Image (cartoon, coloured by chain):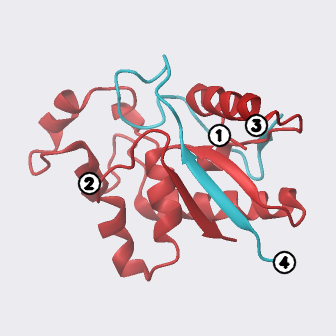
Amino acid sequence: MHTDLDRTKKTSQILADSLQFKGHMFGITQLKERFGGRYAGRQFNEIKKDFTAINYPHELWKAPSDPNGLESIDSFLNRLGIGVELISQLSRGRDVVLVAHAGTIKGLMSLKYPKEQRLEILAGPTPGNGKVFGITI
Amino acid sequence: MTEKKLYIVRHLKTDDNLSESFGSGDRDSQILPGQIID
């Protein structure tokens, strides 16, 4: 499975080809990256002008939602939970491989922790491209 | 419901995000309840 963004579709196709997987690959829109609102698609150096207390891109998770459309943490984690539920329904008892985004991965990993610890995980280091994580659903 | 494993892979670098820009990269993105593509 993947999100509806090209980078996850392309990566899942590469993975499927390498594994000779011929089954259907679903796109789960709820698992895409945090919505950036007006900041979407902009470089960190540009965004930083509006968030002077933030020094590194992964610290943007400490930025609350704002009138410019930056998605709130609660909204983001809520839709991830919906996405996991959809995966659970679609998987029919089988294990699943999902190609997703750094924020999605940290968000999914954070859901097994109490709410007050989740921001620390989200604002933590960004997982590298191609890194694999596992959770039980 | 039976427990199952969800393996999550971070996407590879592809030509739509080489610049590492912020967010979904989909400015007009919206999600409808229960929406799944294809």
Chain to which mark 4 belongs: B
Q: Which residue is drawn at 88% across and 34% down?
A: A22
Tag 1: residue type? Thr
Q: How far apart are marks 4 and 3 (CA)?
A: 25 Å
Specify the chain shown as red. A
Same-chain status of marks 4 and 2: no
In this rendering, the label closer to the viewer, 4 or 3: 3
Neighbor class of circle 2 (other Cα within 10 Å; few <14, some 14-19, many 20+) is some
Amino acid beneath label 2:
Ala
Of label 1 and label 3, which has the lower sequence position? 1
* Mark positioned earlier in the residue sequence (2 or 3): 3
Q: Which residue lies under the disc numbered 4? A: B2
Q: Is residue A91 visible?
A: yes
Kind of residue sitting beneath label 3: Leu
Q: Residue A63 carries which label?
A: 2
Res. A34 visible in picture? no
Q: Is residue A94 above or below residue A136?
A: above
Residue that mark 3 sits on:
A19
The answer for which chain carries disc 2 is: A
Image-quadrant location for residue A56: top left
Marks 4/1 in contact by CB < 8 Å: the verdict is: no
> Mark 2 or mark 3: which is in front?
3
Badge 4 and badge 3 in a common chain: no
Type of amino acid at the residue the image marks with label 4: Thr
- Numbered badge on residue A3: 1
Q: Tell me residue A125's x, y (percent).
A: 29, 54
Identify the chain drawn in cyan: B
